[in-house]
Image: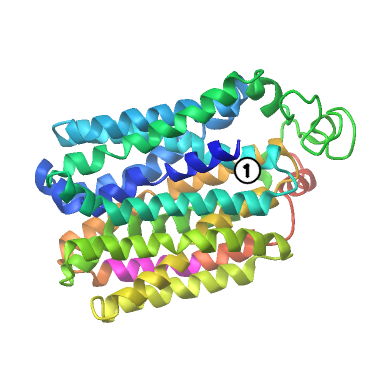
Amino acid sequence: MVVGIVLTALNLRPAITSFGALLEEVRDGLGMSGSVAGVLTSVPPLCFAVFGVMAPRLARRFGPGAVVCAGMVAITAGLAIRPYAGNTARFLAASALALMGIAVSNVLMPVIVKRWFPDRVGSMTGLYSMALALGTSAAAAVTVPMTDALGGSWKSGLAVWAGLAAAAVVPWILLVRARGADSEGGAAGLRPGTGTGADGRSPDTGPGSPARQEPDGLRITRSRTAWALAVFFGLQATAAYITMGWMAQIFRDAGVAAGTAGLLLAVTMVMGVPLAFVIPRLATRLPHQGPIVVALGACGLAGYAGLYFAPASGAWAWALLLGVSNCAFPLALTMVGMRARTGAGVAKLSAFAQSTGYLLSIPGPLLVGVLYQQSGGWGLPLALMAGLMVPQIGVGILAGRNRTVEDEAARRPHP
């Protein structure tokens, strides 16, 4: 299970950051305008919103492991097909296939962590987030030099990431075949072959058992914390996908070489490797996660200011600051696990927060592309990015309060 989680996490962002590193080459190869490129950078959150909401229902029917396995297959196929699609529409369709696999895995990873590792939510979320950051940064760092090594074709540079996705399919196939673990154990909160819950109790007894605590008919939309977490997730996703899609181009427009710009993006992403392990562990030890939200937001504001006033001369500093700010993602994942008491609650909260959040994040990268094309510079896009950081801090403080969605939904009167 741990191997499957780590390999899955490694594959949840290379489809996006490898494209960002070669954005200029892909635009030239497919004849895209800046606005169309902005649309493409908005596709990931759109797919995450549309397909992510389906994940809990699919998991109930087929088991979470089987759904994640299918997701890895979809990522493999999409990444192998899209470089050779031939035009923008087919490139978009193949990208959507890969992003569909990423979307369902995004939603189900917190569910799997909560059910299989209920006493280690912080450390396992940290491991998962660290692997995700490693995959993100690796794709940003090595895509350009790997493209050069493969003959200079951006198609080969993008297609090679399908191999990593194919490797992630293997452990999930083994897990799905092992005694029906997903349908019998994963869906009911059981460990394979034990007949006991993840906490060692019988599934029908004990205060932590699914039979006692799984909420039937939980109306997640009745919880203010769920809404705050969804908006926080959406705003941090907006910042992350703008960064992944456009930051390399900001540096290139400032006179930084293409390889160095990709390396700077990699530095931003690699900051999540150590911090994604530290922040969830710290968050689970605090009664309120608001101070972490404020610290990450302040780093983001400083990074945007630096990109505006001295994008080239201070490039490494701004990359580091934005890398710290992007660690709002593992914090949001950790809060998903902390703001619900049960596996079913985490599944509903994860689907709601991620699907709603990614839906909210769709306009951001598109607006950046439009503003960049219309203004001919990065002043207005950076002002937009800095402006969105302020409400992100506000709703993050609200989402970080010590309460659960089950309790909030129960307290609110039915209409």
Residue highlighted by disc 1: 349
Tell me how the rendering is colored. rainbow
Q: Nearer the viewer, residue 412 or 293?
A: 293
Q: In the rendered image, which quarter is residue 382 located in?
A: bottom left
Observer able to see residue 250: yes
Q: Name the main secondary structure of what is drawn in magenta.
A: helix
Q: Nearer the viewer, residue 79 or 4?
A: 4
Within 10 Å of disc 1 (Cα), the crowding (few <14, some 14-19, many 20+) is: many
Please tell me which residue is depicted at 32% across the width and 35% down the height of the picture: 162
Q: Would residue 233 be counted in the magenta stretch?
A: no
Q: Quadrant of the C terminus?
A: top right
Q: In the rendered image, which quarter is residue 109 located in?
A: top right
Observer able to see residue 348: no
Please tell me which residue is depicted at 18% across the width and 30% down the height of the picture: 85
Q: In the rendered image, which quarter is residue 389 located in?
A: bottom left
The percent position of residue 46, horizontal first and vertical second, equals 38, 41
Q: Nearer the viewer, residue 125 or 384?
A: 125
Q: Is residue 306 above or below residue 413?
A: below
412 with respect to 76 (left or right) = right
The percent position of residue 301, horizontal first and vertical second, equals 42, 74
Q: Quadrant of the N terminus?
A: top right
90 with respect to 111 (left or right) = left
Please tell me which residue is depicted at 77% across the width and 34% down the height of the picture: 214
Q: Would residue 382 be counted in the magenta stretch?
A: yes
Please tell me which residue is depicted at 29% across the width and 63% down the height of the picture: 263
- What is the tally of numbered marks visible in this picture? 1
Q: Nearer the viewer, residue 231 or 341?
A: 341
The percent position of residue 127, horizontal first and vertical second, equals 57, 51
Look at the image and give the residue range highlighted in magenta.
Answer: 381-391
Which SS class for mark 1?
helix
Check disc 1 and give the amino acid type. Answer: Leu
The percent position of residue 380, horizontal first and vertical second, equals 26, 69
